[in-house]
Amino acid sequence: MTQPPDQPPQGGFGTPQDQPPRPDGFGAPQPPPAQGGFGAPQQPPAPPGQPQPQPGYGYPPQPGPYGGTPGPYAGTPGPYAGTPGPYGQPQPGPYGYPQQAPPPPGPYGAPQPAYGAPQPPPYPGIPGAAPGGPAARKKTALVIGAAVAALLVIGGTVFAVTSGGDDKGGGKKPVAHGSDGPVRSATASPTASGGADPDHLNDGRGPGEAKVLWYAPAPDAPASGADAPGMWVTGDTVVKAAYQQVFAFGAADGHTAWGPVALPQKICAVTPVKSDDDKVVVAYMSGAGEHAKCNRLQQLDLRTGAKGWSGEVADGGLFDSALTIELTVSGRTLMVGRSQSGTAYDIGSGKKLYDKKRYGAACFPAAYAGGTDRLIQVSSCGVGGSEEHEELQELDPANGKVRWTQKLKKGWEVSRTYSVDPLVVYLTNREKKTWNISAFTANGKIRSQVAVDEKFAPRCGWAILERELQGCQGVAVDADTLYLPTDATVSANEIVAVGLADGKEKWRVKSPGDRPMYPVKTEGGRLIAYVQPSYDSGGQVVAVPAAGSAHRTTTLLHNPRGAAGVEGAFYDGVLDWSGGRLFVSAGRLSGDDDSKEKLIMAFGD
């Protein structure tokens, strides 16, 4: 295990803050702002007993998770276990910031950057918040092509594959439901395909403006609202889950590609990414009552809409509940996370691969993140004891064997993964109200810790009964660089490129116009970013060269001003850029029958 470098980073993102704890408590929802943008000008009501959702992507940032006042701790020890190093000594802050007394020994044995970093989250352990739905684990902002959890940990399952509801054998092979395929329905059929535009969103397009290619209305939802998690683009098809159905649209014209596929109860979780052969798994509730659990699984083929295997996640031992679950995909492996264990399955067949349970003296799997051929596990160890700590591990997704382990010092939690390959994690210490962002090498060594004198504002989802490691959006990572948006409300901001080799700033670029922009993805040596719409101008998709000396934005798409109001009204917005088209969909439905709410829109030339 390596230690951070011998010289303290000078200020930046991920440093300790001196903000007092929020009076509304760990994870409390944020108050709604006065105006909106891309995300949700109107907040849909939450179900009874649930916290009200936070405004979506494009709203002015709320106090707390990102973009707080500079913190004073220069030279705070970091989160990784090891012998205390020179960082334990007080360091002068940048720009004449006064020296501070050395804080208590930290968990990493290495100090963190100071000054100009974001505030600690209102829910220590998660950056950002945007509640919604029974599991309250909604994504905010961009979903790219994507806590009290410290008390409950995510893990696997006693799994029962079903065939007509009779087969309860935990290890038996699931039965494909080929005959239970998609059913044609006009519930959410496009209203603007083939040139039709009943809402006149393309009227008055200016020179150089793109057009709305098509859009579809939201399906009926309860007055309390409903979840609409995930969006997958595969080939020429865009697939979207909403409430109790999964819809598929032609990417070019919005015509129904298949389905919709109906599920018995409301959808409560989905795999954030698809498998290499275009399979996803959707979880839905066991019933409609207040004691229902998010423990039913259904595999779907994105290309055809055909249902594959199905299963039920059973409760395990004491405190190992399937009240809510987490679904993670790594290659062909589906990891089903429960509160204190994890079980892996072949996503194509549903065949059980292995279990991840308690290990060592008292270590329980807490959460998972997956991508390509990497599977990351976070475990909580010795909870409540003197040896309490967390461990970050990489597993072989095929067999569950541990490739490496990184132990954290007491008090530090792995709250988010900004990227899995390369691995970039966000960590918090709720007691000290500090946090850290670290990049790792392929073998689990500390590669760098971000040290940039700036306030950043990526957007992260909400987690109540479990951690959601892959809930952060508005941040992009390639092999050598982390791209982060600076804090902004409704004005222009910047995207800063941070080198993963040393944690230092490489370059930054300002948003065109007067609206904030956020990273979406990297492709073809470019960073793709989204500029949110304003009241009189549509949103934009821009590209920034990732290498070289000229880091200027080039506009790839400028959406029509006539659609700006609708474009900015998607609550908990889900966004993807694929094939020269921008797809925007709702992450949650308001349930307001009079609002003419849209489920999804597509923009292009």
Image (cartoon, helix red, strand yellow):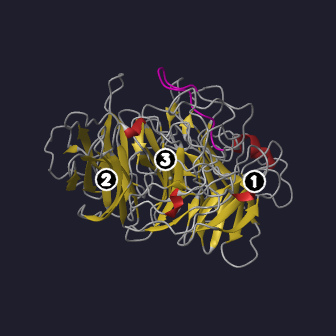
- Residue 42 placed where, x, y %? 67, 31
Q: Which residue matches tag 1?
A: 493
Between 213 and 595, the one lying in front of the other is 595
Lower position in the chain sequence, tag 2 or tag 3: 3
Instruction: Confirm whether residue 322 shows in the render.
Output: yes
x 62%, y 54%: residue: 114
Between 40 and 560, the one lying in front of the other is 40
Question: What is the C-alpha distance between the residues marked 2 and 1?
Answer: 37 Å
- Look at the numbered disc 1 and give the secondary structure of its residue: loop
Lower position in the chain sequence, tag 2 or tag 1: 2
- Residue 429 placed where, x, y %? 48, 45
The quadrant in which the N terminus is found is bottom left
What stretch of residues is rendered in magenta? 45-57
Q: Does the magenta stretch include residue 163?
A: no
Question: What is the C-alpha distance between the residues marked 1 and 3?
Answer: 35 Å
Indicate the amino acid at tag 1.
Asn
Between 360 and 187, the one lying in front of the other is 360
Q: Which residue matches tag 2?
A: 335
Q: Does residue 430 appear to the left or right of 558 in the view shown?
A: left
Q: Does residue 551 appear to the left or right of 497 in the view shown?
A: right
Indicate the amino acid at tag 2.
Met
